[in-house]
């Protein structure tokens, strides 16, 4: 049995899965914010609970966290759960639960889940692309998660928007402080902000992404123009990923990935931006939804 935890800013989700990925037990616990030691205790207690619920002792524990994870030291940086920064969560949890522990970025866990037994299963190169409050992702090759020398593989949200138009320079300020990164154009809040700018209304208090989608369905011209721009920017960004990695599958996650129109429009819009005549990469919705991150942590 494998146990996985998705250590989020508001909740810690846990799952126990069997050898073939079957769910044996699940739970959710409120995150003790700004209390590192309490978080370790929560994971320790949750591990015991999951083992009791499943009736099997865990062989491994995996943890998905926001931010970058140093593969040698296990220390976490750059995440929004600032109380984890600089801590050896892997080592501390391993000492607490008494079984081997692995730890990875939560977007990497999403990609691994979808590559192992999700929408990307069977693909040699699978990219998990998160379109949510932020933009990120992970890369899985032949079932193995790529981390890289700097532990930032898959961070396509912090590449400049490819082939920027004149009115896209220098671009909005990204969460990392730079201007014009794909996250500053393709996250949910960025999409909402783009609508507000075009409509000439304050960004704060403007329509949300679901509201913009509803406005499109009602025939709102500004909402339609905004989303068409979003689609073109997403197509350019995916083309850059494809030109470098040439993946079999790109699996979308995050709140924006729930917009069904993307799966109809984006594949055809990507093709003109890629090198070569063939375009076989599938761009598809995730299979495991909100459970992808915690399942990927278990598969670590």
Image (cartoon, rainbow, N blue to C red):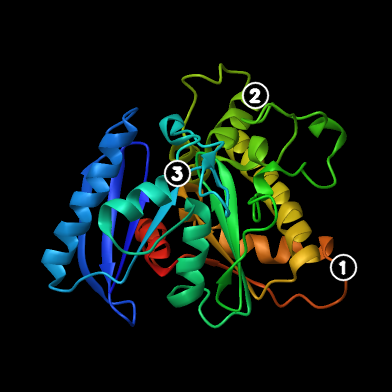
The kind of secondary structure element at disc 2 is helix
> What's the residue at 49%, 46% (across, down)?
217
Q: Quadrant of the C terminus?
A: bottom left
Mark 1 or 3, which is nearer the eye?
3
- How far across and down, in percent of the image, does residue 228 sit? 67, 46
Q: Which residue is mark 3?
A: 88
Which numbered disc, 1 or 2, marks the residue that appears first in the sequence? 2
Mark linked to residue 275: 1
Q: Quadrant of the N terminus?
A: bottom left
Mark linked to residue 197: 2
- How far across and down, in percent of the image, does residue 270 sit? 74, 62
Which numbered disc, 1 or 3, marks the residue that appears first in the sequence? 3
Task: Using the image as rendered, state which of residue 141 and residue 207 is in the foreground.
Answer: 141
Q: Is residue 176 above or below residue 138?
A: above
Tell me the distance, in whole angstroms, between the alpha carbons under discs 1 and 3. Answer: 43 Å
Q: Is residue 189 above or below residue 224?
A: above
């Amino acid at each position: 049995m494998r146990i996985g935890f998705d250590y989020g800013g508001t909740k810690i989700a846990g799952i126990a899965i069997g050898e073939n990925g079957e769910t044996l037990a699940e739970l959710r616990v409120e995150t003790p914010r700004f209390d590192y030691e309490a978080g370790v205790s929560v994971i320790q207690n949750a591990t015991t609970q999951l083992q009791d619920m499943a009736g099997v002792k865990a062989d491994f524990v995996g943890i998905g966290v926001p931010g970058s994870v140093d593969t040698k030291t296990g220390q976490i940086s750059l995440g929004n759960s600032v109380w984890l920064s600089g801590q050896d969560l892997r080592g501390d949890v391993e000492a607490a639960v008494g079984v081997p522990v692995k730890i990875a970025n939560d977007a990497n866990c999403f990609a691994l889940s979808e590559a192992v037994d999700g929408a990307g299963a069977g693909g040699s190169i699978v990219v998990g692309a998160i379109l949510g409050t932020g933009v990120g992702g992970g890369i899985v090759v032949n079932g193995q998660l790529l981390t890289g020398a700097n532990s930032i593989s898959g961070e396509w949200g912090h590449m400049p928007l490819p082939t920027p138009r004149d009115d896209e320079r220098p671009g909005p300020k990204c969460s990392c402080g730079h201007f014009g990164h794909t996250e500053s154009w393709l996250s949910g809040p960025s999409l909402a902000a783009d609508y507000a700018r075009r409509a000439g209304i304050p960004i704060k208090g403007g329509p949300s992404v679901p509201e913009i989608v509803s406005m499109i369905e009602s025939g709102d011209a500004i909402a339609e123009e905004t989303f068409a721009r979003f689609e073109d920017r997403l197509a350019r960004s995916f083309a850059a990923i494809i030109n470098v990695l040439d993946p079999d599958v790109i699996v979308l996650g995050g709140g924006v990935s729930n917009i069904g129109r993307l799966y109809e429009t984006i594949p055809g819009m990507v093709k003109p931006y890629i090198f070569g005549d063939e375009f076989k990469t599938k761009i598809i919705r995730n299979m495991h939804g909100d459970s992808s991150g915690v399942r990927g942590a278990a598969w670590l």
